[in-house]
Image (cartoon, rainbow, N blue to C red):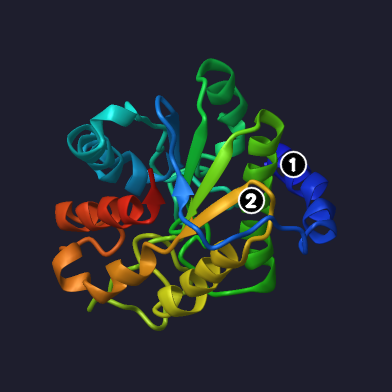
Amino acid sequence: MMKRRQFINRTALAVVGTSLMGCFDNSKFQLKKNQVVGCFGDSITYAGGHGYVEMLQEKFNLEKPELNITFINFGKSSETVSGLTEQDHPGPRPYLFERLDEILDKNSIDVALFCYGINDGIYGKPSDELFRSFKIGVYSFLEKMRQRDIKTILLTPPPLAESSEKNERAMSYSYKNPYPKYDAEVLEKFTDIILEMQHPYANAEINIRKPLFASQKECYGKDPIHPNKTGHRLIADTIFSNLSF
């Protein structure tokens, strides 16, 4: 935990100092021939090797085979970029920055695809500290990409789908029992942080929350955290439609 706090503290001032920096245009991000795309995220990205990352690979192989784009899935279940863990979680949540350098040392990637947030609020109530921790995590990732000259596509967090089993009076909240307004009060704010993140290596922002939220009945089953196959297909199609070639 100390290691996590030290890393966050080192980057906190940098976030404040460069929060107005940005190199933006509204054009679609362009993938180039033979590029390797590293996909970073939690269990929604990992998806047992059968989610949106693999669907993107299939889609490119079928529709843009001449580009020879390779997607590598670096997703890890339960992971965060905020370094936080809820009390009811079985042990500390994995923290991306404890493995990121090793991944980058061992894998040569040209573009990073980033999708975090669903776990980063640890399913509890909103707070300024919570939002700051997530913002610092996103910024810190972008700084790592800047050091390696890796262009980055930021995805918004997916929504927490509506569930009928909500405990308004819970003493503590967790992935088993999320704060009832977690989606509206935490994940919507995380989405704003992604869409408004200004950094020279935030080269594109893609809103996957909006289409998933609008199609919750089709994209989620009983599990409000993890999209079903239809949901993953929607994520892949949304990403594909927001790229240029």
Seen at 33% across and 30% down, the residue is 67
Q: Please tell me which residue lies in front, 157 or 200.
A: 200
**Residues tagged 1 and 2 counted as in contact (Cβ below 8 A):** no
Q: In the drawing, does residue 195 fall left or right of residue 90?
A: right
Using the rendered image of the protein, determine whether residue 220 is visible from the camera's viewpoint. Answer: no
Q: In the drawing, does residue 89 fall left or right of residue 213?
A: right
Specify which label sits upstream in the sequence, 1 or 2.
Answer: 1
| C-alpha gap between disc 1 and disc 2 | 10 Å
Which residue position is annotated with label 1?
7
Name the quadrant of the C terminus: top left
Residue 70: quadrant of the picture: top left
Q: Please tell me which residue lies in front, 165 or 21.
A: 21
Residue placed furthest toward the top? 106
Q: Amino acid at mark 1?
A: Phe
Residue 226: quadrant of the picture: bottom left
Q: In the drawing, does residue 58 fall left or right of residue 170?
A: left
Which residue position is annotated with label 2?
137
Q: Please tell me which residue lies in front, 79 or 115.
A: 115
Name the quadrant of the N terminus: top right
Q: For mark 1, does the 10 Å Cα neighbourhood hold few (<14), some (14 to 19), or many (20 or more) residues? A: some
Q: Amino acid at mark 2?
A: Gly
Seen at 38% across and 56% down, the residue is 242
Where residue 233 appears, as percent x and y from the top left, is: 20, 52
Where residue 7 appears, as percent x and y from the top left, is: 74, 41
Q: Name the secondary structure under disc 1.
A: helix
Relative to residue 216, is residue 21 depicted above or below? above
Using the rendered image of the protein, determine whether residue 186 is visible from the camera's viewpoint. Answer: yes
Seen at 50% across and 58% down, the residue is 27
Count of numbered marks: 2
